[in-house]
Amino acid sequence: MEIIEEVLDEIESALKSPKGIISHQRRLAFCLSLGIVYLLEYYLKKLNVFKPGAKINHLWLKKKKENVKKFISNQITCPVENIKSLNRILDVAYILESERNELAYGKTSSEENLKEKISLFLDLKKEIENA
């Protein structure tokens, strides 16, 4: 849970920053990417299907869903179709990862866009914790 706490600290810091959330854009991009990978791995571990020593690569998460599922299927002990919330998780992961490099290395985004990404992440975190 240390990783998720670090991600949540950065989100909180960004939201409360007197400089505004945009001043945290690059850190948020990296933290949300790290956080979504952690949530997916946590969920798979919670279901007791994640192979020991397995890892999810954040780069997979911006590929087509069928391809991501192929990569994930090599990391789990059951058919990927048996994981009920996987589509939802992958949908959110795709949104976060597809803009990750632009947010991290590109031009300044909008406050609204950053808040939307944070909201998606926090909503998914809540869903996974309650699953």
Image (cartoon, rainbow, N blue to C red):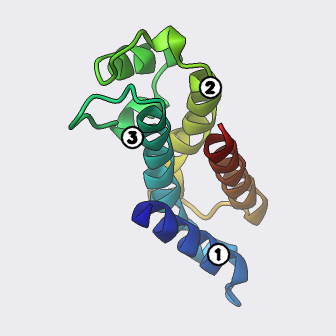
Disc 3 residue type (three-letter): His
Of 34 and 4, nearer the camera is 4
Q: Quadrant of residue 113?
A: bottom right
**Does 14 appear above or below 92?**
below
Disc 2 residue type (three-letter): Ser
Which residue is disc 3 drawn over?
58
From the viewer's perspective, is the residue at label 1 or at label 2 nearer?
A: 2
Q: Residue at left 54%, top 64%?
A: 28
Whether residue 43 appears in this view of the structure is: yes
**Residues at marks 3 and 2 touching, judged by CB atoms closer than 8 Å:** no
Query: Could you give the CA–CA distance between mark 1 and mark 3, rounded to whole angstroms?
Result: 23 Å
The quadrant the N terminus occupies is bottom left
Residue 85 - label: 2
Query: Could you give the CA–CA distance between mark 3 and mark 2, rounded to whole angstroms?
Result: 18 Å
Task: Judge left or right: residue 131 versus residue 45.
Answer: right
Task: Judge left or right: residue 121 versus residue 38.
Answer: right
Disc 1 residue type (three-letter): Glu
Return the x and y of residue 5 as percentages of the image width and height. Answer: 50, 68
Q: Residues within 10 Å of mark 2 (few under 14, many from 20)?
A: few
**Residues at marks 1 and 3 touching, judged by CB atoms closer than 8 Å:** no
Of 25 and 93, nearer the camera is 93
Return the x and y of residue 71 as percentages of the image width and height. Answer: 34, 20
Q: Secondary structure at mark 1?
A: helix
Return the x and y of residue 104 as percentages of the image width and height. Answer: 47, 59
Of 123 and 48, nearer the camera is 48
Q: Quadrant of residue 110?
A: bottom right
Which residue is disc 1 drawn over?
12
Q: Residue at left 25%, top 34%?
A: 54
